[in-house]
Structures are given as C-alpha cells and as structure tokens.
Amino acid sequence: MKLIFIFLISIFFTNCSFDNKSGIWTNENIDKKKQSDLFKDFKKISLSEKKFNEIIYLDDKFKFKLKKPIKNFKWNDIYYNKNNNLHDFYYQNQNTIEFKSKKISKGEINPFFLIDKNNLITSDHKGNIITFALESGLIDKYNFYKNEYKKVKKKLNIIVEDQVVYVSDNLGYLYAYDYSKSNVIWAKNYKVPFRSNLKIINNKLIASNQNDQLFFFDKKNGQIIKSIPSEETTIKNEFVNNLSLDKTNLFFLNSFGSLYSIDTVSMDIKWFINLNQSFDLNPSNLFLSNQIVNTRNKVVISSNYSTYIIDSKNGNVLSKKNFSSNIRPIILDNYIFFIIKNNLLISMDLDENKILYSYNVDKLIANFLDTKKKQVKFKSFMIMNNEIFIFLENSYIINLKINGELIQLKKLPSKMNSVPINIDGSILFLDKNNKLIAVN
C-alpha cells in the first residue's frame, strides 16, 4: 500500500509546475478548430507545404526603425480604422485601475465596443444599443426590436460616425441610430441576415449578408446603391465575411475564400483571387480566416493554412507563408508582426519578404519564469510604446521588446471579457461583470 501511495505522489509532482501560483499557465489547452470552380479566371493557390515551426533568431546587428507612438482618442470601428490595422499606441503602463464603471448591461455583451466623443458604444444579445458617457456615467439603452423578436438572440454589427451608429443584424435589418438624440434616422429590412463587419467611405455604408452578397448603401437613407453577388457556400461555418478599405478600394473576403478588390467610386470589381485550400465542401475544410489588414499597397490575409501578402493593385500573390493565425497581424511601416497558431511570435520585413525572427512564446515564458513549458491561450495583441503587448485569455499580459525579448509578465487588475482597446494612454476593456475598466 505504501508503494502505491509513493507512486501516485511521484506522478502528481511530475506533472505539476512549480509556477502554478502565478496563474500564467491556467489556459494551457488550445482550442482546435467548396463546390465546383464557379469562375474560370480564379487563381488557385496550392497549400501543400509543411506547417512552419522554426525558431529564427534576430540578427544582433539589426535595429528596428519605428516612429513615435501616437496618443489615440477614438475607436469608431470595431477593428479600429478603415484598413483594420492598429497603430503603435502610447501607453502609461502602470497597470493600475484608473476608472471602473457600473454594470453596463446584465445580458451577454458584444466582445467589441467603440469609443466616440467620450462615449462607449456597444450592444448586447437582446438587441440593445448601449451608450455609456465616460464623463457623466450615464447609461442609455435603445432597443429597435419588437416583442416578436424578444426571444431571438441578436447579433449586431456596429460602426459609428458623427454620433450616428450604423447597425446591421442577423435578422436582416439595417438601421441608423443617432445616439446623441436617441433617434432612429432610418431603418430597412432586407430579410437576409447580415454577416460582416461594416465600413463607411464618403456617402456609402458597406456590408455583406450570409449569402456572400456585397452591398453599397446610401448612408443617408439606407437605400441600396449597388449589390454585388459572389460565390455562396452551401454549408455555413463560423467565418464572418470581412471588409477592409484603403483610399480608393474595398477589399472583400467571403466565406468561399475569395478576395475581391472593388473600386469604391465606380463600385466595379477590379480583381479577385480564391484562397480556399479546397473546393470539396465538407465541414472539415471550410474556409476560415482572420481579418484583412492592408497598408502600403499590400493586403495581408491569414487563412486556415497559409498567410498571404498580396499586391493590392493587381491581386498578385507577393508571398505565401506556410503558417496561419487566429489573431490579425499588425503592420508598422515595413514590418509586420504575427502570432501564429503554434504560438510563435513572428516579425517580417514586408519589403524584403524576409522573416526577421520567430520565437516560441510558451518557451519565452518558461525561460523567463524558469519553469516547465506549457501552452498559453492568446486573446489579442497590440504594439504600444514601441513594444509588443500580448493579452492572454486568463487576463495576463506578456510584454516584449520589439525585438522579441520578453521583459515583463503581469496580470491585469481585473478580468477581461472583451477585446481590449487603447484610448488616451490607457487600456480599456469590459470585465466579467460587464463593467468598463480603464487601466493606465
């Protein structure tokens, strides 16, 4: 009996980490998550390479050339701006709670929220548009829906401009709500559920529905200016059609895996390319991707299996890398930063199409803590103060120099329940109780 007891105790200690008190490893399990050729002109991409899993050390002589971080005061798009790319933000980095609101909603809340003219704007599954005045603390809720939809879970897509919140939903409604006057300007029912983020350019509001149909609406009245059909998949998956803008072009990625470039003035298709790994429609190979990011005449997309850097002028694939990411990358000038699915942090030189470094984040943490390597689960990341800040699902922050050197691990003073944003040198997020937290 003593031998059995000793054996069980030895197994227990063998499998335990000496770092359990820090809590950094509490999310060690990582979530594991079409038809015939409809367009003969599609460029097909072969995806047969072995998955990238290489450690590459940065050249000791290499120096990143970065601009001064900006102080940001608004977040009018759920992906920050028209091209979905983040800036290098200024951050006070004191990790103390500067502000904590009262509960904003009792229901399940949207993981994305906006900041406009010192007001937080978000939504919940009941269909409420919620505005919270940061200065006064006043909360206003508006619900567009009638009693017949009371038991239906609503998925609202929002964007704000000039105090007007534009909303599309999973019921097929599209409307504009002036939150400063608590007034609906216009509302339309297009019957088919919308399934994309929203974009605004000049007088046009842009959205896509679940049938992969793209729409340009007049933002003044919600009337359709133009609709563009694209390939529709018969099997629906979790992918949400994605939109990104540059100065003159819209980039539209649909659930079939096709990327379109569309002139925002003429609304004509300029080029398209298919990035799907297979046209065999079954649940195991449906197309998935993170959000489109574009800058400096380049479009970056990370799909199920590969990451593409595409010439925005003509759709030519400039580079295809055999790694994939669930988190959208960040582009700073000619540098791009990825966190890929096997927990590698990668930096590339976009101009030279060269990987500058590739480090395993789990290994960096283990070395920093002098403990056994396990897996962490990422939520998002930002670049602030010319440094990389990775947010984990368990509300820890990993702080690294821009060269990939880990310099700090810390836990946020409150648990995070939304995608964090940066406003006026502070990190803002909603906690588990749907309270707004500002960490300076």
Image (spheres, rainbow, N blue to C red):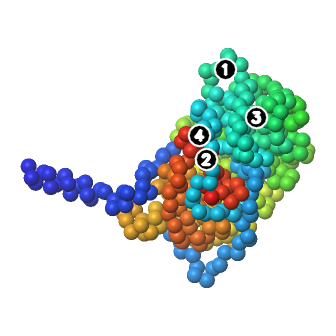
Query: Could you say whether the residue bearing mark 4 is in a helix, strand or loop?
Result: loop
Disc 4 to disc 1, how far (Cα)? 23 Å
Q: Earlier in the sequence, mark 2 or mark 1?
A: 2
Residue bearing mark 1: 149
- Above-or-below relation of 9 to 241: below
Quadrant occupied by the C terminus: bottom right
Of labels 2 and 1, the one closer to you? 2
Which residue is drawn at the image coordinates 49% and 51% (left, top)? 394
Disc 3 to disc 1, how far (Cα)? 16 Å
Classed neighbour count for the residue bearing mark 2: other residues with Cα under 10 Å, few (<14), some (14–19), many (≥20): some
| Marks 4 & 1, CB-CB < 8 Å contact | no
Classed neighbour count for the residue bearing mark 4: other residues with Cα under 10 Å, few (<14), some (14–19), many (≥20): many
- Residue 100 numbered mark, or none: 2
- Residue 434 numbered mark, or none: 4
- Can residue 169 be seen by looking at this rendering? no
Count the labels in the image. 4
- Residue 167 numbered mark, or none: 3
Query: Could you say whether the residue bearing mark 3 is in a helix, strand or loop?
Result: strand
| Residue reaching furthest to the front | 136
Q: Earlier in the sequence, mark 3 or mark 1?
A: 1
Which residue is drawn at the image coordinates 71% and 72% (left, top)? 66
Q: Earlier in the sequence, mark 2 or mark 4?
A: 2
Of labels 3 and 4, the one closer to you? 4
Of labels 2 and 4, the one closer to you? 2
Classed neighbour count for the residue bearing mark 1: other residues with Cα under 10 Å, few (<14), some (14–19), many (≥20): few
Give, as a three-letter code, the residue at label 2.
Lys
Give, as a three-letter code, the residue at label 1.
Tyr
- Above-or-below relation of 328 to 433: below
Disc 3 to disc 2, how far (Cα)? 27 Å
